[in-house]
Image: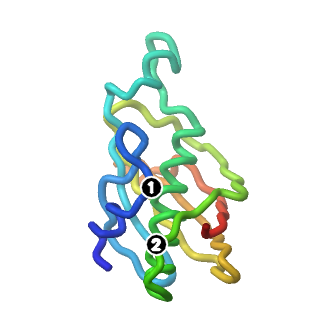
Amino acid sequence: MTKEEIIAKLPYSKPFLFVDEIIKIDENGVEGCYTFDENLDFYKGHFKNHPVTPGVILTEVMAQIGLVCLGIFLMNENSNKTASIALTSSDIAFLKPVYPNEKVRVISEKIYFRFGKLKCKLHMTNQKSEAVCTGIIAGMMV
C-alpha cells in the first residue's frame, strides 16, 4: 500500500483532514506533516486578534497521522479489509503554541498492536524542530 493510498483511505475530508503527507511508514511507526491554513474556521474565534491552534485540533492531527494512518497500514498488511480506528484514550502534554500557516511534523512509534487495539507514543514538532506536544494515544480498529 502506498502512502497516497493510505491518505485516500482516511475517513476524513477537508476541512477535517489533517494529513498533507506521509514521509515514512512501516510496521513500527509513521512520520507525517500537516500545514495549518490561516483560513480554517477555528482561527476566527480562538483567540480574538491572536489566533492559536486549539489543543483538541493538535490532538486530532496527532491521531490522524500517528494512529489512523498507521492503523490502516497495519490492517492492510494483515488483511484485505478496509478499517477505521476509534480513539479510546489520549494523554497529551502541550508545550508550545501552533499558529496559522505553521507546518508541523508528527512522529509516531507503535507501543503495541494486538487484538485490534493500537497504542502509540507521539511527538509533534514545528518547523524549527521544537517540541509542540507529546503523548500517548490509543484506539480500536473497527
Using the image as rendered, state which of residue 119 and residue 132 is in the foreground. 119
Q: Nearer the viewer, residue 69 or 127?
A: 69
82 displayed left or right of 95:
left
Marks 1 and 2: CB-CB under 8 Å? no
From the viewer's perspective, tell me whether residue 49 is left or right of residue 4.
right
Relative side of 23 to 129, left or right = left
Residue bearing mark 1? 11
Residue in the foreground of this view, choosing between 52 and 2? 2
Could you tell me how far apart the alpha carbons at marks 1 and 2 are, in whole angstroms? 11 Å
Task: Give the x, y percent position of residue 58.
Answer: 52, 44
Locate the N terminus and report the quarter of the image it occupies. Answer: bottom left
Q: Position of residue 30 (x, y in %)?
A: 44, 71
Q: Which residue is mark 2?
A: 82
Label 2, residues with CA under 10 Å away: few <14, some 14-19, many ≥20: few
Q: Residues within 10 Å of mark 1 (few under 14, many from 20)?
A: few
User: Who's the residue at 44% across and 11% down the image?
Assistant: 49
Q: Residue at x 48, y 27 (%)?
A: 52
In the image, residue 27 sits, relative to residue 104, either above or below, namely below
Q: Residue at x 43, y 41 (%)?
A: 16
Q: Is residue 62 above or below residue 121?
A: above
Secondary element at tag 2: loop
Query: What residue type is disc 2 on?
Result: Thr
Identify the secondary structure beneath mark 1: loop
Where is residue 33 shown, x and y percent of the image? Answer: 35, 55
Q: Which mark is residue 96?
A: none
Front-most of residues 6 and 43: 6
